[in-house]
Image (tube, rainbow, N blue to C red):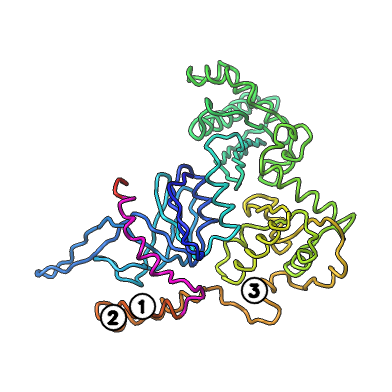
Amino acid sequence: MKLLKSKNSGNGFGYVKLKIESEDDIWELYNLILSGDSVRSVTYRKTHKENTSGTVSVKVHKLVMTVIVKNTEYGGKTLRVSGFNAIDNEHVKMGQHHTLELKVGSELILYKRSWDWLARTRLDEACKKKIGTGDDILILLIGNGVANMFLVSSQKTTKLFTVSHNITRGGQNNNNSYKESKNKFFQMIIQNLVSHLNFDDLDNIILGGPGFFKDDFFKYLFDSDNQKNKEFTSILKRKKHIFIITKTSSVFQSSIDEILLSEDFQEKLKDTKAFQQVKLIQHFQYLLATNPDLVCYGLKSTENALENNAIETLMVSDALVRSDCLKIRSKLANITGMNNSMGGKTCIFSSTHNSGKTLENMSGIAAILRFPVEHLQECEVDEPNQAWETGDEGGGRDDGQDEDFDWFKKEKDEIKKHQMSQLDNNSLEKQFQQNSTISDNFLASLKSDKQDDDFFSEMD
């Protein structure tokens, strides 16, 4: 991700101008853009106009819009940001719903009322990462008639493709059919490899699976008699060294951790983030079984350990970071910021990795301690998620929506009842100010930066 410009007003409000350079950046934005933030980008809006003849004409307008985010939807190659228009324009009134679609090549401005430690760290890591840094791990798992290709990046695990083919059982009278069906299966895998990967840019492919199919595929791949594409054959000869063969118990995602924890690969993978997170969870589970006083999980236990400056490594699931509940995000920002200021290490786990899913099952937050903390076990709650939902010990349950959306919902209903054109737009701003939990005038700040439209002037 490319950082084009940043601005901080000094009272918490600030924005960054970004350009999406890869699909990994889309995942980073999915974790960075939260409900209550605002996003400004080029978008398209359909308008309908009834002609004098009674027919309705539809016109698509290209415009720049600022959307106060209600929710985001990650689609792999796109990120859909839905919310309410914050600035009135010719085609979309303030308060109307709109969805921005961001993809590779898109440029945007992201506004936040407060750039906490989590947001700043996530942004810094995303902008420092370069395409093709070698942190990605390609894993091809092959079994009897089934093959799965995975890309394990620093932030997520993605299944690139699945190949399934019925292989005829071999026998004394059926050997040719078995060989033909197996070769057909291998050829289908090769076709998918060619369509998904650029072999010239690859540093390694881990070839795994139970049984002998992975070994047979490797032999088939480098047998020139089986390859009709001479250019691909030439590339393979130069890239034979990138293939690493290992045994796994299955061809499914659960076997990825077997590879990451294998002693054969630890030296090669030790600098990758996915490997470090798997090792961290493994160490946590070992301590939990052998010396439970040196670990904690759940909100109350973690807060108690932090108050005693006992946390060595704090582990947080990115599912908590993306929470729609303002209380959860605020409490999480305070915990991570305080841990950082005390010299502790904070690790954000991807919920798409197996290690991240393990952490989610332990309430989404856990820590490895420097020393035991007295009475820490007494802080445990029966339901770890309960503390997150209430936000504090005595508070009520949050409905998961920021207060800023309440007035937007009411205003939207009024628009439907009384026609949007008759509303006083100034009243919207007054309601926003009254309901805002932050002292600065967020909406006014958005309007004051409206002159940044020239930033998008050269966009497609």
Can you identify the residue that label 1 sits on?
428
Q: Is residue 439 magenta?
A: yes
**205 above or below 99?**
above
Q: Is residue 398 above or below residue 56?
A: below
- Magenta span: 435-456
CA gap, disc 3 and disc 2: 36 Å
Q: How far apart are the alpha carbons under marks 1 and 3?
A: 30 Å
Looking at the rendering, which quadrant does residue 177 occupy?
Answer: top right
Rendered location of residue 40, percent (x, y): 38, 58
Q: Is residue 433 left or right of residue 140?
A: left
Q: Earlier in the sequence, mark 3 or mark 2?
A: 3
At x 30% / y 51%, what residue is drawn?
454
Give the secondary structure at mark 2.
loop
Q: Residues within 10 Å of mark 3 (few under 14, many from 20)?
A: some
In x, y percent, where is residue 54? 13, 70
> Relative to residue 430, is residue 372 drawn left or right?
right
Judging depth in this view, the residue of 21 and 453 nearest the camera is 453
> Residue 300, position in %: x, y?
75, 70
SS of the residue under disc 3: helix
Disc assigned to residue 423: 2
Q: Are marks 2 and 1 in contact (CB under 8 Å)?
A: yes
Residue 389 circle label:
3
Residue nearest the viewer, comparing 375 with 214: 375
Q: Nearer the viewer, residue 311 or 355?
A: 311
Q: Residues within 10 Å of mark 2 (few under 14, many from 20)?
A: some
